[in-house]
Each structure stands twice: as C-alpha cells, then as structure tokens.
Amino acid sequence: MDFIISTKADQSTAASRFSKMGTNKLFKIAKYVLFDILRNRFVLAYTLLLLALSMSFFNLEGDPIKSLMSLLNIVLIVLPMVSIIFITIHSYNSYEFVELLLAQPMRRSSILAGLYIGVAGSLSTAFLAGVGYLSYYLALAARDLPSCWWGFY
C-alpha cells in the first residue's frame, strides 16, 4: 500500500476525493455515450416516428383525452420493443469501447452507471421530443385545461 490514512478526517477527505473522481468519470462516460447515441440516425428516426404518431393522433381525433389514450396504447407496445432492440444493437456495437473502459483504472460500477445513464438519457430525450412536449401543448390548447391538471405548475 502506497499511503496510509491515519485519522478519521484524512479518511473522509480521501473518500470524498475518490468519490468525486469516480463521479466525474461517470458523467464523462455518460456524456460521451449520450452524444454518440444522439448522433445516430436510428434515434432520430425513432423521434420522428413518435412525433408523427402523436401529431396524427391529435389531428385525427377531436377529443385530446381519446388521443392521449390511443397514443398511450401505441407507446406501451412500441417503446419497450424499440428500447430492447436498440440497447441490444448499441451494446453489441460498443463492445470494444466497453472493453477499453474496463481496462482503465476505474470502478466497474461507475462505468456501468455511465453507460446506463447515457443510453437511458438518449432514449428519454427522444421520447420527450417525440411525444411529451407535443402532447402536452396540443392537449392544453385543445381543452384549455389548467397546467396543474398535468402535474406541472
């Protein structure tokens, strides 16, 4: 062992220093994965598909509640299927990158958490851009509902 920590204060300082280093690396990995996935055409096509579905449901149906229910049924079928397929393809294509990360002196938990945050963040961003914002504004405009009905204040 190269160094010995003698007091409790030194131990807490060392622990906070090491945890900050792990968090910094975690967010670097998450940022790289997020931007790598967002450049992918698949995520753009997924966002445009969700946007087209939500626009078509709101334009075809006069009642926004029925539109949201129809959109919810489609999203409950499409979202898990597309997510599983995309995560499988992404993990297969980034196998060498993960091997390179595992060879670095980093915690495995911070590597896996960074990869998870990056993939989940990109798919969540695509979902919110495709369904969330448009559904929120169109439903509010169509029904003149107060924003507290949606849970936003």
Image (spheres, helix red, strand yellow):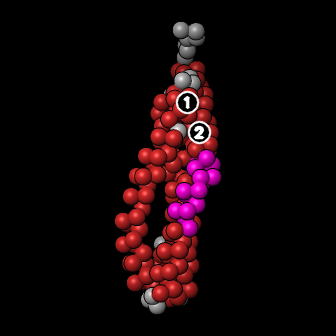
Q: Is residue 52 above or below residue 1?
A: below
Callouts 2 and 1 close, C-beta under 8 Å: yes
Residue that protrudes farthest toward the top in the picture: 1
Q: Residue at x 60, y 34 (%)?
A: 25
- Residue 133, given in percent of the width and then of the height, sits at 56, 71
Residue that protrudes farthest toward the bottom in the picture: 62
Q: Residue at x 39, y 58 (%)?
A: 81
Which residue is disc 1 drawn over? 101
Q: Earlier in the sequence, mark 2 or mark 1?
A: 2
Q: Is residue 150 left or right of residue 48?
A: left
Query: Looking at the picture, which amino acid does disc 1 mark?
Result: Leu
> How many numbered discs, if any?
2
Q: Secondary structure at mark 2?
A: helix
Magenta stretch: dominant secondary structure = helix
- Residue 70, given in percent of the width and then of the height, sits at 39, 78
**Label 2 vs label 1: CA separation?**
9 Å
Q: Secondary structure at mark 1?
A: helix
- Tell me the crowding category of disc 2: few under 14, some 14 to 19, or many 20 or more residues within 10 angstroms, Cα based: many
Q: Residue at x 55, y 11 (%)?
A: 4
Res 68 visible: yes
Q: Is residue 40 magenta?
A: yes
- Range of magenta residues: 34-48
Looking at this view, is 92 or 26 the one in front? 92
- Residue 29, given in percent of the width and then of the height, sits at 59, 39
Q: Is residue 49 above or below residue 20?
A: below
Q: Is residue 104 above or below residue 72?
A: above
Q: Is residue 22 above or below residue 144?
A: above
Q: Is residue 15 magenta?
A: no
- Tell me the crowding category of disc 1: few under 14, some 14 to 19, or many 20 or more residues within 10 angstroms, Cα based: some
- Discs 2/1, front: 1
Which residue is disc 2 drawn over? 29
